[in-house]
Amino acid sequence: MAGNELVVDVAKIKKAAHSAIPLTITTYTLPHEIEVYIEEVLEVFLGELGQARIKDYLVYCLRELAVNAKKANTKRVYFETKGLDLKNPSEYEEGMRSFKADTMENISYYLQKQKEKQYYIKIIFQARGSNVVLEVRNNAELTRTEYLRIQDKLAHSRKYETLEEAMSQILDASEGAGLGLVILVLMLKKMSLDEECFDIHTDNGETVARITVPVAAAKIESLSSLTDELVRQITSLPHFPENIMTIQRLIADPKSEMVDIARNISTDPSMTADLLKLVNSAQFMLPRRVDNIVDAVKLVGLRGIKNLLFSYGSQKILADQRGTDQRSLWDHSYRCAYYSYNLAKNFKPGNRALQDDAYVGGMLHDMGKIIFSSVHPELLDHIKAFCDAKGIEKATFEDLAGGMNHSEIGARVAEKWNFPESLVAAIRFHHEPSLMTTDFKDVVFTVYLANVFCEYELGGMSYDQVDKGVLQDFGFLSDKQFGKTVDQFVEGFRQESIKQRETASMKKDAPATRR
């Protein structure tokens, strides 16, 4: 995000706050204008999450951690220049005796070297579950000596209750993590947080300093209450179609024959036509075109047909609601479904069940947004009255309308419609894969990454913002590799869209067949 024009993109920050997308600011030298920019971004981000009151405390904490990261990077350059080994205790002590004086005399030289050697500092803001997570990362791993010194300072901080008390003590000024870290812990205390909310560790070549701030309990409770009330009051959404549920039960019955299942599907001409259109699309890569539902059931498999019916039924219900943003939401869903399926097919080969679950998970991941867009005005009035009666702030309702908790809304409705647990998990955790347990990790990771692909191609996310655990799971090692894969998927979807339009046009222009 750092560049020549440091303009705070308020819309992007609000979107990140509502959808758990991490915001990343990368710098090599941490100039003053970047520090000011970080403060401005933090102010908007915290304000959107109802945490504006703690902004000044967190500004100090972030600045302290960023300066420490910058000093750590400078130290690496300095030791490399002097030919000293950071990990050798005696050489470490030798280097630190002259480090501060030498670098202060010629700081511009060492900062330029940092940039040349690509030693970076990343400041990351993320709304993660019920927490605000702030991280400062730099690509220089802590040595054991450095780590022990930091832990020593943190231990010292437990003795102090006030800033004045800490300042009266003589602390080691040779390390960047001296008095500053003690003050940081005291800042946490002022926010009613304990030392456990701060953590520093190494991860894949980076030093990660993390502050975790629980979002105000009242706000979380209010959002949860609003979500409960919204789901309870959505009477305009019918129960899942009974004819589809009947077929689903038939599929689940081990005594059922494929011919029986196909026959039941065939009793609904519209459903038959739509399912055949879907199974003949490029997503399923069938060896030949399928023209009857019996062949479709055999080739796609019972699990695949079962999931397609969930997707079909949901679209039939939600498409009838005529929401204002429905078209763009469904366009995004189709794209995400295509990406999900192909991620499963290409990166998890041999897992047919994942391919089936990933496709429908991608199709329905934003169901909560689609549902909210279809809410009738009288229901919105009811929800606003509910806010007044419960003393819930207007801003919390606006957060809900803006997309906050849409994953939970979608998951609750999916549960109401008796969706399988894997699909409920894909809907609930598609923005926060790190919160997922191992049970449905594969489908959640796949749908999350497909959604990231959609954001990445539109410039809404960068490689740095993608969950590291998911990247590792899919084997992405660099921005270049990731970007190339996204480009391939974008082109594949474009080609598929062209084929579908051509097929639809040919059918429209074809003469009627005489019987």
Image (tube, rainbow, N blue to C red):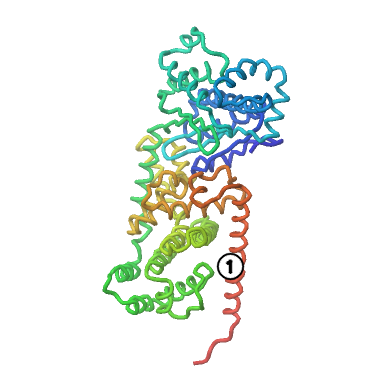
Q: Is residue 495 left or right of residue 443?
A: right
Q: Residue furthest top?
A: 168
The residue located at (54%, 57%) in the rendering is 332
The residue located at (53%, 17%) in the rendering is 178
48 vs 35, nearest the viewer: 35
148 vs 131, nearest the viewer: 148
**Where's residue 507, x and y in %?**
57, 79
The number of numbered badges drawn on the structure is: 1
User: Which image quarter holds the N terminus?
Assistant: top right
Q: Is residue 99 above or below residue 137?
A: above
- Secondary element under disc 1, as helix, strand or loop, is helix
Q: Is residue 483 left or right of residue 246?
A: right
The residue located at (48%, 45%) in the rendering is 469
**Where's residue 13, x and y in %?**
56, 39
Q: Residues within 10 Å of mark 1 (few under 14, many from 20)?
A: some
39 vs 393, nearest the viewer: 39
Q: Is residue 100 above or below residue 403?
A: above
**Where's residue 320, x and y in %?**
45, 63
Q: Residue furthest bottom?
A: 515
Q: Is residue 2 above or below residue 149?
A: below
Is residue 293 in view from this perspective?
Answer: yes
Q: Is residue 116 left or right of residue 280?
A: right
Residue 191 location, quadrant: top left
Is residue 32 in view from this perspective?
Answer: no
Looking at numbered disc 1 in the image, what kind of residue is underneath it?
A: Glu
The residue located at (48%, 18%) in the rendering is 182
Residue 224 location, quadrant: top left
Q: Which residue is mark 1?
A: 496
**Where's residue 238, x and y in %?**
35, 61
